[in-house]
Amino acid sequence: MAKEITIEELRTMARRAGLPLPDDELLRLLPGVKRAQSQAAALRELFTNAAEPATIFTTFKIDLK
Amino acid sequence: MQNTQLCYLTIIEAAAALRKNDVSPVDLTEATLKRIQAIDSNLHAFITVTADLALQQARQAEQELSAGKDRGPLHGIPIALKDLYMTKGIRTTCHSAVLENWVPDYDATTVTKLKEAGAILLGKLGMHEFAFGGPSVDAPFPAVRNPWNTEHVTGGSSSGCGAALAAGLCFGALGSDTGGSIRTPSAHCGVVGIKPTYGRVSRYGIIPLSWSLDHAGPMARCVEDCALLLQAIAGFDAKDPASAMVAVPDFLCGLKDGIANLRIGVPRAAWFDENLGVDEETETVFNQALEVLKSLGATIIDIDGRPFSLARKANQTILVCEAYAYHEKTLQETPMKFGSSVRRRMLEGAFLSAADYLTAQRARSMLNERIRANFSQVDIFAAPSAPRPPEAFSTMDPNEQNLRPSFTNPFNLTGLPAISVPCGFTQGNLPVGLQIAAKPFEESTVLRVAHSYEQATNWHDQRPVLE
């Protein structure tokens, strides 16, 4: 499992994402981001490589329009 | 009939009264508008009241009904919409400064269908900003308050729908549900709300929160009214890529067939006790509801709650990623236009990776399979609609909800139809909801079970003291 995100990493990622967020806002954001990342990490334990995502592209839907 | 009595008629009762000429669409509309004017300043259920349009539609309905042109049971019935349903020529704000003065140039498919059914639009209802976060304290419109106790929240995000129905400010409403946003305010306000199967009702013209989890559905004061509203809005829509080409049954037919021999799965183990667990009073009320269902001929079967518990992690990961993707440009350019609560939740999605999102979608496939596998031994699932009663504004803790089980998320993740029906009150006189979920496209089953329960109890007849 990846290590927890730090405020410095969050600041860098926000800049790269084009998000003009001041430091006080990033600090308030940090606990939620940690929780979201840990939730996503926990899901990795659930399945084997055979599992496909529930996102399926179907050409038929387009034909129906 | 007194004004309050008129405003608290069910749609079924109002439709019958209209056809006996006991009341007219104009009477119903004027009574409701008068009540909105009298009490909504304490509740803030409405963002926009379309009084002139409503009266014009009411007069047209009156003329049509008098002339024998009957569009069906919603003809002449005043309804309202969560303010994320696009309405041509009428402001649609999503309760946000981002869209504070935005006026769409077309109607959502569901709005078109209600217009065709002759329903009267009273206005647009307050909500959690962009259907996410919590009650906003920094949005341009005040947070909606619970008619049962205005110091308490309504639950969300279809907050105005719950409050307006409980307060007799409309006869039916359309909400939306991405993680519980129809069922939670229905439970907290003591009304009925159904989240249909994913694909059953068109999402076209509804501002998205999360494309793959968003569901549109009706809320009302009784199950039969929900069935009527669902009948009017369900069906395939080529404009919605997720719309299902599945025949729409008659949702009223079979409603009164009872639940003898029904097998009810209760996923209590490893779900109800997650972290802080379910509130004790809520669980007591839920257990009493199960006893009522047993007395009606159903059998209760304990099933494994683990996949239901895990569903929340997948649901929330998908939700924040999709919500961020939709709002990315606005969050980059004018982030402070969003209220603090919704902004911080959406921004979580900026810091998750593509692999995180796809991991959640893979988990979704697996959990969907595990949850649906239970249908080999049960017909429906039952759980409380919310893990605790509506909290007070003064002690609201947005982090606490993450420490309680989410009873609603699994049915967004799996797309299964689920309803919340009133099932009792706490000692503090706050409503509690019973949630029933069934197999895909079996809305008729959830409606039948909820209706059977409703007819055996009188919780749905209780009204808050407002005047």
Image (cartoon, coloured by chain):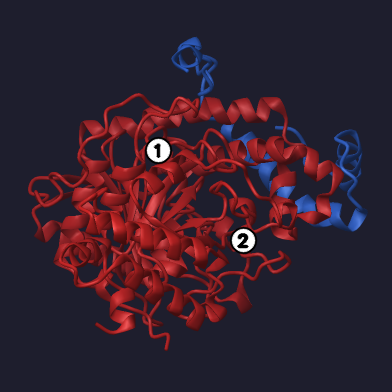
Could you say which is closer to the camera, residue B372 or residue B180?
Answer: B180
Secondary structure under the numbered disc 1 in the rendered image: loop
The answer to whether residue B365 is above or below residue B316 is above
Q: Residues within 10 Å of mark 2 (few under 14, many from 20)?
A: many
Q: Residues within 10 Å of mark 1 (few under 14, many from 20)?
A: many
**First along the sequence among labels 2 and 1:** 2
Chain identifier, red in the render: B
Chain identifier, blue in the render: A
> Could you tell me if residue B270 is visible in this image?
no
Chain for disc number 2: B
Q: CA distance from mark 2 to mark 1?
A: 25 Å
Task: Say which of marks 2 and 1 sits in front.
Answer: 1
Could you say which is closer to the camera, residue B77 or residue B239?
Answer: B77
Residue that appears at 26% across and 63% down: B287
Secondary structure under the numbered disc 2 in the rendered image: loop
> Could you tell me if residue B199 is visible in this image?
yes
- The answer to whether mark 2 and mark 1 are in CB contact below 8 A is no
Query: How many tags in the picture?
Result: 2
Callout 1, which amino acid?
Val
Residue underneath mark 1? B201
Callout 2, which amino acid?
Gly
Q: Is residue B427 left or right of residue A10?
A: left
**Which quadrant, please, contains the C terminus of chain B?**
bottom left
Residue underneath mark 2? B134
Q: Residue furthest bottom?
A: B467
Give the x, y percent position of residue B181. 49, 53
